[in-house]
Image (cartoon, coloured by chain):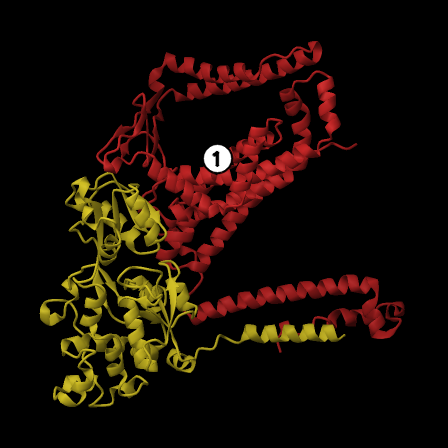
Amino acid sequence: MRTLATIAAALAVAASFALSAPASAGTLEDVKARGSLKCIINTGLIGFAFTDANGQWQGFDVDFCRATAAAVLGDPNAVEFVNATGKTRFTLLNSGEGDLLYRNTTVTMSRDADLKLTFLGVNYYDGQGFIVPKSLGISSAHDLDGASVCIQTGTTTELNLADFFRANNISYESVPIETNEEARQTYLAGRCDAYTTDHSGLAATRASFDDPSAHVLLPEIISKEPLGPAVRQGDDEWADVVRWVMTALIEAEEYGITSGNADQLVSGSDNPSVRRILGVEGSYGSFIGLDEEWARRAIKSVGNYGEIFERHLGPNTPIGLERGLNAQWTDGGLLYAYPIR
Amino acid sequence: MTSVTTDPAQDPRMSGASKPPSLFDGGLQGFLRRKEVRAVLYQILAVTVLFAAFAWMGNNVVINLKALGKDFSYEFLGQASNYDINQRPIEYDSQSTHGRAMLIGIINTGLVAFVGIIFASVIGLLVAIARLSPNWLLSRLAYAFTEFVRNVPVLLHILLVYGVVITVLPNQREGEEPFTLFDRVILSNRGLFIPKPEMHQGAGYLFIAFLAACALAYLWRRYAKVRQEQEGKTLPVLLPSLGLIILLPFLMWLTSPDSLTFSIPEQGRFNVKHGLRLLPEFFALTLALAIYTSAFIAEVIRAGILSVSKGQKEAAGALGFSRLYALRLIILPQALRVAIPPITNQYLNLTKNSSLAIAIGYQDIVGTIGGITLNQTGREMECMILVLLLYLSFSLFISFLMNIYNRSIALVER
């Protein structure tokens, strides 16, 4: 009889589970209670998210995760990194395995609306390009008629590729590969004439070749790929936190606040914009549920946007990307941060 | 409390109360311990728990999807897919629907499974026979092959074979000369290119000639069998049949060469143009799966052969059967009776393992509907359910065919 009662009790518990919708407290409270931030990043892409010699995650996207953790929790290392392929990233975010997504992810309407995500701006302006061996003697993607093109699946690249070749009435063979690493091997083995993915990704991949100079990036950029962070739809408080941390890093560069001079500028600057970012004037931190030093901590931990870019992608790194579209608007780029005021 | 929380034990007990008092001897405890009651009650209980678990999971899915604001719909199958597929057995371009892309995935999976199963069976049978051969070297080689192949994960086999195929075959991009045969067949790491038959008016006659040849071959086989039963003479069957099937359509073709022409592969700027192309991905995947599965099939067949009593072989020898004939006519038919059910398992494994094709970019079910379509539409639940059902159908279909075959060779008991 006792067994029966136990089973009945178990059933009752199961049924009550079934009836209670999953609890949805705010992500900000969850993160604070947990004491760590779960950030979804790439499984490995030099420059954006990769492990250094000490096994620590480094990279452009990784630093934005750390800045968010520094602003929310006061510790840039309080981040649990969740690695995602192009295919798994949205599922991981939507199922609550991660609090935010910084995985060189293109902002598109279908992802924003149909996949129920909220995108929070753009941290890298990218576009899809092609890499080919120099020996092919090609100078334009329009010369690729009949060529085999390796693509990394699970991204918007298949769609752009199909559109580009259809619009230009060029025939081609698509060879879809699951990960960047295997796509790189397949391309190097000569199975494909060209490899296509985001321009920044191509530059990063080329940096890992034995002989980077034997391969050239074609001038055509066949798509707009604004890469940016995303959170689950419907948690506006948390969305605000992630959006304004990123904005603060971009605006910090505009006003010359760096990881090195942030503390001096707290007392040494009369510029109201600087003082607002650093939390000396106004109470902007409290608007997003944080203290007033949120942005100062973020900037001090990883530096401003320019510092992050120079450290991981800039001309002095193996990737060697110019700022290009990713320069501040004052320098002719597209970075035009919403003002913090 | 809802209907799910109602104690399921209540109902049977209450209905039990209305039954003859003999069931209730010894009170509730005795009632619950009775054999008849136990047999029914615990089954009802088990089924209830199972259903409750499923209902819980299903309910959670619905609630969670609703919480995310996502609906459940297969409308995307009718929308343009916007991506290209390199192996297209049927017409397809990026403006075709997701449903058609899925159909291509199904055909591509079916192709790999079909060709893979044939090769796995042939290699498996040969290895099993070699393994049991009195020739020491041959049997040791077969032994080493089996042990190596079946103890390495199948994904490694696939990556290894693919790596070998694309690095060992001539790399056209770097200017290496591809292998050619009479300028008609080209082989490089872009694939195998062979002349592609193209049907024109009058091709129907060729088909009729082919059918007629098959019918003749069948009649010849029956005649040979009757002759053998009456006179004990064996007539050659295989070669004459093959000759007939090739020669008759060929003669027909000579009378009207325009009915069937061939598109010859020729070197283009990047890839070979025209002709029929066998992708290196298809080749590598099929070969890897066939090799991997053949090791298991070899062991199953070996077990089957060993299960045939030694007396059968000795009796065959005493009656003057050659070793080959004894194997073909006496040992193998009996061995297969034992081996077919486990071989069916291996066929299913091969088909399911083909889903690893994504690793090398072969566009099968997982690559199309479970891959690019899933990613572009964001319909994980819908796509994964489809993928699951498709593999289930494949498996059930293969089981169905193999069960028919199994019944046809099973010992008929009177």
**B110 displayed left or right of A89:** right
- Residue located beneath label 1 in the image: B115
Q: Is residue B88 visible?
A: no
What is the drawing colour of chain A? yellow
Percent x, y of residue A208: 26, 54
How many numbered discs?
A: 1
Percent x, y of residue B135: 59, 26
Residue situated in front as seen by the camera: B51 or A76: A76
Which chain is mark 1 on?
Answer: B
Residue at the left extreme of this rendering: A331
Q: Which chain is red?
A: B
Q: Quadrant of residue A26?
A: bottom left
**B29 displayed left or right of A270:** right
Residue situated in front as seen by the camera: A276 or A190: A190
**B370 displayed left or right of B41:** left
Residue shown at 41% from the left, 51% from the top: B369
Percent x, y of residue A29: 40, 82
Q: Residues within 10 Å of mark 1 (few under 14, many from 20)?
A: some
Image: A53 above or below B294:
below
Image: A124 above or below B131:
below
Where does the N terminus of chain B fall, quadrant-wise? bottom right
Residue situated in front as seen by the camera: B365 or B64: B365
Q: Quadrant of residue A221?
A: bottom left
Q: Amino acid at mark 1?
A: Val
